[in-house]
Image: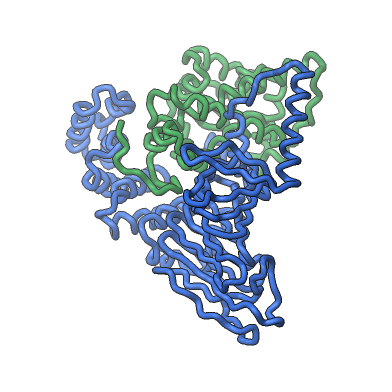
Amino acid sequence: MTPSSRLRDYVAPTLSEARLARQFSRSLELTKPSAGVALPLRWSLAVTTVLLVVGLAAQSWGLRWWATTTSPAPLPLAGTVLEGGALEPRELRLPDNSRVELAPSTRLLIQEAESSRTRLLLERGTIQVDVPPHLGRDFRIRAGEFEVSVVGTKFLVELGPRGQGEGLRVAVERGRVRVRSASGSGTDVLLSAGSSWAARAELGSPDAGEGPHGVPSSSSIPSPTGAPEPAPSFSPSATPPSSRGPFDWREVRRDQGSVAAHAALRRRGWSNALAESGPAELFELFELARFARQTEDAAAALDALRRRYRGDSRAGLAAFELGRLRMDLLRRTGPALEAIDDAIALAPEASFREDAQARRVQLLDRLGRRADCKQAQKVYQRRYPSGVHWKVVALLCEHS
Amino acid sequence: MVVTNPSTRSGSGPTDAALVLAARAREPWAQEALFRRYAVMVNGLAFRLIGRDDELDDLVQDCFAEAWSSLHRLESPGAFGSWLGSIVVRTTHKLLRRRRLLTRLGLRRGAPLDLDQLVSPIAPPDVRAELRSIYRQVESWPAGIRVAFLLRRVEGLPVEQVAEYMALSLATVKRRITQGDRLLGDCTSGEVVGTDAAVDSTPLERGRSL
């Protein structure tokens, strides 16, 4: 009879990023409480008619809707135009739980507003947007000739009024934002947290060609890092510099899945990617590699984080996760123990401490170090008399 | 339990306990992180229990929806993985019972089992033959015997864990597995009563802390 582990290995579904994204979205939808109370049919029809009339009026007349400043406004309808107040900013909440704050004198059109798809058109002014991370979310803002797309971030978009030579400015506070030409050619830049980008172009030349809102369609020069930096104006006859953004594995992951994104990074050099990454990115790379079932690369990302950023609040956690990988998947008991010990040393009061202590006992048991195993067992039992791993820990250290 | 090491908002780093706490605090990134961490496990376990792909998405969605709704009842946040596993087993069991009842009442005519789609094309001949035999047989079994048997025989879980997932006594689980062995015509039913020495240890990807 075939060992069970072999049988399991040969019965598995085909999973893609898109499929998982759908499953996740749907699981969230299934937990939302159903809206409203059942009304008798004639009342239902009356209410529906009223809502329909209001919706049509809002769309055909460009009805203005001022959100309150005290609390986010009710979810707006697609087709609604919103304007910031003369003096005060306004805030609203969208169906996908994103929040948008409109600065004074801002004008924003909501083209689409669904739980996983949002399209906004910034006609003038400044908005601050806070988009929670959400698998499968499609959130885009059209501003002038550019399109800003996001996956889970907080950022600012500012578009100068027409005819005054002002352009688009995007500043990212958290996460990542992509800015590209709406026409699909020319500008395509990726901005990370702490960076900003600005585009300016002169109007007036009849040969410039205009995109929507009178902004010339020629591309502009990005400055994706550091403080805001005005891009020089240029004439339509000048050759715009290449403005393709850097390789973005997150885009590849979203479009083609984790396996493809990981493979693309590997072609460029996994070690290089690790060397260039800060602690937050190293965690993301760890997750990417795990999802692509590349355990060695996942372990390398964690190892890089805990060794290079020992003062970072995530170092202890990285060491612990590394210990788990080495113990459970890579089956390297000695290195696993080293990582677990490092985790305990780096973060002695962390929430994973109990797990770490229990694993320590198990690892020492596997290594045959009976005296150390017994000692670690006592430490665990004293510290966690009602611990979740109590029963398992109690059975160890007898035969090592 | 206090979360002293908040992770990145991408949710790739924290332990299950930290993520559960964050998810309870209505941090959407934490739910996503938990989903990402266990989606493969849940899909795999559900698939191997129901034996077909066409109902898998609904089943997985229901399992995670149940998890999100019941997160506040999870007493040990660090045991999220095994708790989720028990949700998968319970939900699948109900689905199989419902399916079997509707079929017997003539209210359901499901698609025939596609064994070629179920078993990987790269499976060695002996493994392929065994899996085809198992899944062909379990289609007609009562749900309780089918689930217990598949968890033990295909999933490779220790008998104690099967009992925990199915919320049954050890004796009941052993009896069902033995019944499954008998139905399958397997002569090695002694493995059920013996130790777990013949069964591989549970890999972490199924979400257990140890």
Q: Position of residue B107 (x, y in %)?
A: 81, 18
Please tell me in which quadrant of the rendered image residue B98 appears.
top right
**Chain identity for the colour blue used in the image:** A
Q: Residue at x 44, y 22 (%)?
A: B73
Horizontal side of A372 relative to A219 (left or right) equals: left
Query: Split into 4 quadrants, where in the image is the N terminus of chain A?
Result: top right
- Compared to B126, does A187 lie above or below? below
Please tell me whether residue A18 is drawn above or below residue A225 in the rendered image.
Answer: above
Res. B203 in view:
no
User: In terms of depth relative to the viewer, which is nearer, A90 or A136?
Assistant: A90
Where residue A3 sits: x, y (%)?
Answer: 53, 35
Q: Residue at x 61, y 67 (%)?
A: A162
Of residues A314 and B126, which is closer to you in this image? A314
Q: In which quadrant is the C terminus of chain A drawn?
A: top left
Q: Return the x and y of residue A116 as percentages of the image width and height.
A: 62, 44
Relative to B95, say whether B127 is above or below. Answer: below
- Is B182 placed above or below B6 here? above
Q: B208 and B61: which one is in front?
A: B61
The chain in green: B
- x and y percentages locating residue A8 in the rendered image: 57, 37
| Residue furthest front as drawn | A86
User: Is residue B2 at all visible to an observer of this figure?
Assistant: yes
**Which quarter of the figure has residue A32?**
top right
- Image label count: 0
Outermost residue to the bottom: A237
